[in-house]
Image: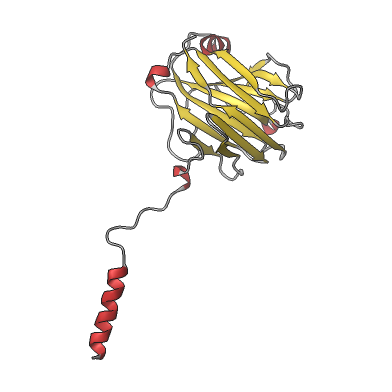
Amino acid sequence: MKNLLTLLASLLVFLQLPFGPSPPEETADEKTPVKGWRLVSYFAVPATQYSKAGKGVIKAESLGGRASLFREVKEKEKNLPILSWRWKVSNVVRSAIETRRDRFDAAARVMVVFGEGKGFGLGRWAEPSGLKIEYIWASHLPKGHVFDHPGERFCKVFVLESGEEKVGRWVAERRNLHQDFKTAFGKEPIGLLAIGIQTDTDHSNEMVTAYYSEPTLKKR
């Protein structure tokens, strides 16, 4: 009888187990805070937090953090010249120095990556690879200033907004990517691979909240 009870107990345990392999646990690489966009984190730096904030609007919250969202450009979009979006920031990063690698924070930036083939590398910390332009909301540099990124090769930075005059207000931007590519790199543009957004305060340890309407590509 004792052996029979032991057998019955083992059978009940067996029947309670799920059949087939267990589903894999979600890894950090698979997490995406906004559908259609890929999160890129930067090693030990706390991540900027991104979330949906209404239809077509992304909210970024950064407190001494840094992370980016990127989306791959569809084949039919690769040669569209006009990029437009709106953005709003709670404040600028007051201690930022945009021309210094160790102080280059920005309340808001929109990034475009040009190149051939696939843009994304492997791994959680891999940004799309290619020639890059960053459009930033600067703290101190004047609007219209164009300069070399202090920490990246093959990247030019365009200052679209600067200072706190427009803080707390939605500001509309429209850029001709083909013209900007010629200004940045002195040659005819190549196909667009990816679009990204980033709010970062990892050098300053300040706090910024920014909102972006999802950038859209147009023919004119």
| Residue at left offset 58%, top offset 10% | 183
Give x and y (percent) for residue 148.
63, 20
Q: Is residue 8 left or right of residue 103?
A: left
Quarter of the image for residue 212 reads top right
Give x and y (percent) for residue 143.
70, 16
Q: Is residue 3 left or right of residue 208?
A: left
Where 55 sits versus 166, above or below? below
Where 200 sits versus 144, above or below? below
Nearer-the-camera pick, 16 or 197: 16
Q: Residue furthest front?
A: 55
Give x and y (percent) for residue 34.
50, 36
| Residue at left offset 56%, top offset 40% | 42
What is the quadrant of the N terminus in the image? bottom left
Give x and y (percent) for residue 18.
31, 63
Question: Is residue 132 visible from the viewing direction of this image?
Answer: yes
| Residue at left offset 71%, top offset 28% | 168
Quarter of the image for residue 107 reads top right
Q: Is residue 89 left or right of residue 195?
A: right
Nearer-the-camera pick, 146 or 11: 11
Nearer-the-camera pick, 176 or 59: 59
